[in-house]
Amino acid sequence: MLQQLIYVALSSAVPLTEQRLAIPVAVGAGSLDPIHVCIASYLGSLLPVPFVLLFFNAIFKWMKKYKAFDKINIFIENKIRKNSAKMVKYKELGLIAFIAIPLPTTGIWTGSVVAAVLGLDIKKSMLCAAIGGLISAVLITVISVVVGAAFFGV
């Protein structure tokens, strides 16, 4: 069981899929308690936050020097441009809501990147990521349990 929960935690730290994939897969497998899945996923999703907040700008600046990274740089810039207006307007509440809503292109990774680029306070951004990540983990777990029960009898 511990090995499976570690896998859930690490899966939740992966960009793009994060909790949105790790929780439904783990709950759907049926061998783990959904509460344990929620906690493991939440903790795992927080792993990259301090690193993103502290090092993203330096790494992104370095990447911009090399043509090989052009496609990923454009992808990242588009994500930042698309999502930064909400953060500027609503600050911490916007960051919490952005991270908490489990939709494509939202989440802890993107929220942390936008916070880093906008130069939001690191401590506040960490707290916002923790609150938004918890809300997201609970929402996704509840949805996974309800949908699993309704459609698959899990």
Image: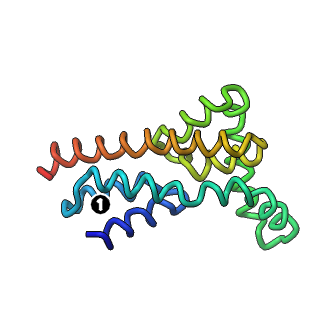
Q: Is residue 61 above or below residue 84?
A: below
* Residue at the outermost top position: 89
Residue 144 position in % (x across, y down)? 28, 47
Q: Residue furthest right?
A: 65
Q: How dense is the environment of label 1, judged by Cα within 10 Å: few (below 14), some, or many (20 and up)?
A: many
Q: Is residue 126 above or below residue 56?
A: above
Question: Where does residue 68 sit, x and y in percent of width and height?
Answer: 78, 73
Question: Is residue 74 left or right of 31 when viewed as pictured?
Answer: right
- The residue lying at 38 percent from left, 69 percent from top is 7
The residue shown at (31%, 56%) is 37
What residue lies at 53% left-to-right and 54% top-to-bottom? 46
Left or right: 92 as drawn, with respect to 44: right
- Residue lying at the far front in this picture: please name it: 123
Identify residue for label 1: 26
Above or below for 110 versus 28: above
Q: Amino acid at mark 1?
A: Ala
For this rendering, which residue is in front, 121 or 12? 121
Residue 5 placement: quadrant: bottom left
Colour logic: rainbow
Which SS class for mark 1?
helix
What residue lies at 73% left-to-right and 56% top-to-bottom? 54
Q: Total label count?
A: 1
Residue located farthest toward the left when viewing the structure as drawn: 153
Find residue 95 and report its horizontal and vertical position in percent. Answer: 61, 36
Q: Is residue 125 left or right of residue 40?
A: right
Residue 100 lies, in percent from the top left, at 49, 39
Task: Out of 65 and 59, give the one closest to the viewer.
Answer: 59
Image quadrant in which the N terminus is located: bottom left
